Amino acid sequence: MGKGAVKVNQNGYRNVTGNGNLDISSDNPNGSCCCCKPYTLASFTTGGGMWDLSEYRGDGVAEPKRYWRLTNNYTSYVSVQRGCVDENGKLVGLPGSTSTTTYKYTWVFRIEIGCRDGNIIRYPTGTESASLYNC
């Protein structure tokens, strides 16, 4: 059996590869997220109306080189729109606003920040194929 050292990131976590193995390399060149944790950047609940997304459209909104998606509860949190976070932390392609129909349902919108793990992007509410993103 070979020797190796477990890589511990700056947060004190051991890095784990997409297939569940410990990452014993000194770097992780394949783009796997290892120490990246998906999270919800913002959410908005409405009984009908519009969510102004302008405050999430500038630089420094999220960590660079991650992924974002806009979801809602009526799509079972499948992406309504998606994009990449650039090197300045900007959510590239995020629309200025999102709106519901005139139906009087309670809509829950979320902007989620995801992490690449091999061929998938992990989000708090599920995963998507990385091939859907053109970053």
Image (spheres, rainbow, N blue to C red):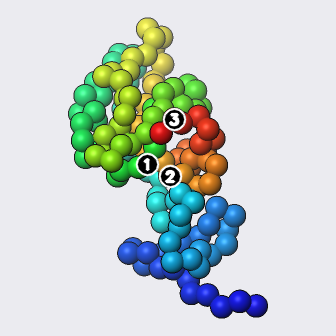
Height in image: 121 above or below 36?
A: above
- Label 1 secondary element: loop
Residue 58 visible? The answer is yes
- x then y, percent, for residue 4: 61, 87
Residue 112 visible? The answer is no
Residue at x 33% of width, y 21% of height:
97
Q: Which residue is mark 2?
A: 115
Q: Earlier in the sequence, mark 1 or mark 2?
A: 1
The amino acid type of the residue labelled 3 equals: Asn
Q: Earlier in the sequence, mark 1 or mark 3?
A: 1
Q: Which residue is mark 1?
A: 66
- x then y, percent, for residue 115: 50, 52
The amino acid type of the residue labelled 2 equals: Cys
Q: Is residue 6 left or right of residue 100?
A: right
Instruction: Determine the image quadrant of residue 133.
Output: top right
- Label 3 secondary element: loop
Say few, some or many: other residues with alpha carbon within 10 Å of mark 3 (under 14 / 14 to 19 / 20 or more). Answer: few
Indicate which label's residue lies in the foreground, 3 or 2. 3
How much space separates mark 1 and mark 3, taking CA atoms?
12 Å
Residue at x 56% of width, y 47% of height:
121
Residue at x 56% of width, y 83% of height:
6
Q: Which residue is mark 3?
A: 134
Foreground pick, 125 / 24: 24
